[in-house]
Amino acid sequence: MNTPSDVPAAAASPCPYSPWLERFAWAMVVTTFFLLILGGTVTSKDVGLAVPDWPQTFGYNMFLYPPSLWVGGIFWEHTHRLLASLVGMLAIIMAGWALLKPGISLSLRILAVTSLQLVIVQGLMGGLRVTEISTVLGVLHGVLGQLYFCLTIIIALMTSKRWLYRHQVSRKASPTAASQQGLSIRTLAYMVLITLVIQLSLGSVMRHYKAGLAIPDFPTAYGQLVPPLTNEGIRQAMDTNAGGSQQKLVGYFSPFKVSVHYAHRIWAITVVLSIFAAVSALGSRGYLQHQVLLRPTLAVIVLLLFQIILGASVIWSGRHPEVATAHQATGAAILGLCVFITMMLHMFPEPQSTLKTQGSSQADAGTLAAEVRA
C-alpha cells in the first residue's frame, strides 16, 4: 500500500491520514461484531430476561456485580451488557476524536456523532426491552444492532488511506465498459443491501417471537411447498407431519409465526438471486480483476453457501442455540462485507459510455491494482 509521501501533492487528500485513528475504527468494527454474536447468543439461549432489572444488575452497579454470580443465563446477559458498555465507550472516543482532530472531513464527523447517538439509542432500547418486557423493542434492538455494525464499517473505511486518496485512484481506474447496459453496478450493490436488511429484519422478528421452528421441516413446509396459514390447517399439518416428534412438544404455532418463518425462507431466495446477479455483474464488467473487490466478493459467496447450510441446520437440529447464533452471525458478516464492497465501488468511476475501448481500461487495470491493493 502506498504511503502518503508516495501520493503526488496535487492529488493528495485534503484530510490527513491517521493510522491510529484507522486502527481504532477497525477495533470498533471487531468489538461490535463480537457484541452481535453475544447478543445473538442471548436470544438463541432465550436468556434476555435472565437479569430482570436495568441499568442495575440484581441491584448492583452493573460494573461491580460479583463474577462469582455470573452463572447460567445471567452470565450471557450480563457479559452482553458489559461488552455493550465497552462499545458505547469506543463510540464516545471516536466521536470526540473525529470532532477534535484537525482536518477530519465533515462527513466523517457527522457519521461519528451519529454512531454515538445510535449506540445511546441502542442501549436505551436494550434496557427498556428488559424493564418493559417488550418483544417489539427486542426486534428493533436486534435490527438496529446490525445497522450500527454497518455504520462502524463505513466509518472505518472513511478513515483508511485507501478511501482518503481514492480520488487519485479513481482518475486512473476504468473498469471494462463492455457491458454497461441496464442497472449501474452501484445500484445493484444498494439493491443487495436492501434485500439483506429486509432479511435480517424478518430474521429478527422470527427469533424474538420464537418462530424459529414454526415450520418444523426443511426444505418442505409441513410436508408441503406452501405451509398452512390458518389455525386449523396448522393443527392438522402438525398432527400429520410432526405427531409424536420433538417439535410437536412445543405446541401449535400461530399463523403469524408460520407466516414470518415462511417469509424468511422465501426472501432468502431473493437474497441469493440478488447477490449472484451482483457478483455476475461485477465479473462481467471487469471489477473483479481488482483484489480489493475480488477477495470480499469471494468471501460473500463462501459465507452465503455456508449460511444456507446453517439455515437448514437450525431446523434439522431443533434450533440448537449455537447453530442459531452462527446463522445470525454469518448473516451479519455477509451484510458487513456487502457494505464494504459497496463503499469500495465508490472508488471506481461509473463508465460514461459503452464506447470506451477495453484497451485503455485494461491498461489502467494494473495501475489501479497497485493503488488499491491492501
Image (tube, helix red, strand yellow):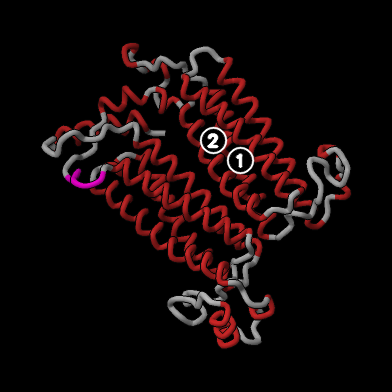
What residue is disc 1 on? Answer: 32
Residue 24, located in which quarter of the rendered image? top right
Q: Nearer the viewer, residue 197 or 171?
A: 197
Question: Which class describes the residues within 10 Å of circle 2: few (<14), some (14-19), or many (20+)?
Answer: many
**Residue drawn 56% across the image and 48% down it:** 143
Taking the magenta stretch, the answer to whether it contains residue 181 is: yes
What residue is disc 2 on? Answer: 152
Taking the magenta stretch, the answer to whether it contains residue 124 is: no
Q: Amino acid at mark 1?
A: Thr
Whether residue 95 sits left or right of residue 69 in the image: it is left
Q: Name the chief secondary structure element in magenta.
A: loop
- Could you tell which of marks 1 and 2 lies nearer the N-terminus? 1
Q: How many marks?
A: 2
Region of the chain picked out in magenta, as a range: 179-183
Q: Mark 2 and mark 1 in contact (Cβ < 8 Å)?
A: yes
- In the image, residue 350 lies at what x, y percent? 25, 35
Q: Amino acid at mark 2?
A: Thr
Question: Which class describes the residues within 10 Å of circle 1: few (<14), some (14-19), or many (20+)?
Answer: many
Classify the position of the C terminus by image quarter: top left
**Residue drawn 26% across the image and 31% down it:** 173
